Image (cartoon, helix red, strand yellow):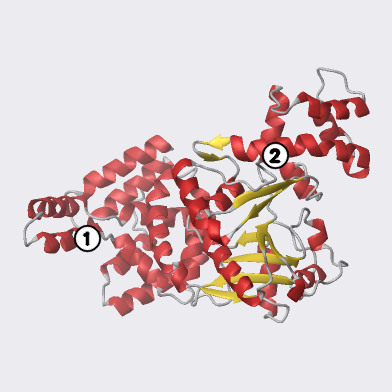
Amino acid sequence: MDTSLGTARASVEAGLGGASGVESAVDAARAVIAQASGTPAPVEADPVLEQLRECAREAGGPVSARARASAVGERYCQMSADERTHFMQLLAYSFGPDPKVVTRAHAAYTRALGSPAQWEAENALRQAVHSPRARLIGQFNDMPDGLKFLLDLRADVLSRLAAEPGLGVLDQELQSRLASWFDVGFLDLQRITWDSPAALLEKLIDYEAVHQIRSWADLKNRLDSDRRCYAFFHPRMPREPLIFVEVALTSELSAAVQPLLDEAAPLLDPATARAAIFYSISNTQPGLRGISLGNFLIKRVVEALHRDFPRLEIFSTLSPLPTFRKWLDRQFSAGTLPVDAALLAPLAKLLDVKAPACPLQLALQRTRWTERPEVAELLQAPMAALCAHYITEVKQGLYPHDPVARFHLANGARVERVNWAADISVNGFNQAYGMMVNYRYIPAEIEHNVDSFAEAGHIALGPEMS
């Protein structure tokens, strides 16, 4: 598929060179789709392609073109999976800029550099690379719920990229436009409460991606007086949270998530809280992948909490380690466990494990350690050491392998503490054998931490990690 799509795309670009605009791409686009799918190009006209072409030409004026784009968008929502793939291929291959026009405009700009004509040539080059595809995206944006339509369209593109890498050009164009439309300056930070509309509360239940909301009672507990939930909204999507964070107001740094989710736990007077624990951050729109909102959300929420509760001293996450178990299981399989043997000796003695068997692997995978306090206690030291090693030493290039660690460290947090048996749910066990991490945000240190992490991959550590 990769080779055929690459060859087909090259043929499209070559075909565009002898004609102009959208008209020149139609026959070549049909050849692309046929070659990529291995089937003969259809002789009959493609009605979707014809509709898209009329929209891109703005036949009848921009108002008529937008009305047609709206009809095409509504039709897309009713398409089958294969029809949607065909639609995306048409957008990707049939509506790019004309290579000859771009080449001429670039040559004119190069000649004009340093002369009074430079700025006019620059504008001409900008217009040359503005593709018919971009005009179509703008028309879809003008649909009722057009912004949500484009988010869902990009989510569809992303879901097909592995099998259809040629859709990458459409993905990049969509991401570029969405990044400007979803700039944080356009977004509203809102607190969500138990009194918020029921439809919005239902979406929180559906979108929660870290700790599943099990019931309405569970949700009510997460929105109680000692809890806070904040979300970013776009003015054109007022009923659709883009990303939300759940916060627990506590008396100290939290070491486990189950007490925070306990519906029977006593309420804390928020005015007496010393710590704000960010225990769940959920992105709700796959179409916003690669467009960072989480860092702005955390900083805005810290500001709001500090304003409302001046006594707060600690702003910290209680974060999962989504890839820790996979990494640790690979160490078990390879026999390359990076931990001091002395930390495993008490566990081996308790379980009567003889070399070369690994007492840690046996205890984690074959014992009910959550029901055996004596085993759980001896697991704490080696698991904490391994977790600290994983966060600080296991890298992808310059930065930590763990995606959650990369996110918070890039935002200026420091690694405050690793916590054993912090999430003993099935999901917590499957992700990280129960381990979680506190990443702490200290406002006076954030800017320095951001710079040193970006430039040298430096990981800021709290006193317990040093």
- Image check: 154 left or right of 199? left
The residue where tag 2 is placed is 387
- Contact (Cβ within 8 Å) of mark 2 with mark 1: no
- Nearer to me, 73 or 445: 445
Q: Few, some or many C-alpha atoms within 10 Å of disc 1 (few <14, some 14-19, many ≥20)? A: some
- Image check: 256 left or right of 126? right
Which part of the image, by quadrant, shows the C terminus? top right
The x and y percentages for residue 226 are 76, 72
Identity of the residue drawn at 46% across and 50% down? 451
Q: Is residue 209 visible?
A: no
The x and y percentages for residue 27 are 28, 51
Q: Mark 1: which amino acid?
A: Arg
Quadrant in the picture for residue 35: top left
- Image check: 25 left or right of 387? left
Identity of the residue drawn at 55% across and 64% down? 299
Q: Mark 1: which secondary structure?
A: helix
Vertical relation: 185 (above or below) 258:
below
Measure how far apart labels 2 and 1 are at the Cα level: 50 Å
The x and y percentages for residue 193 are 70, 77
The residue where tag 1 is placed is 126
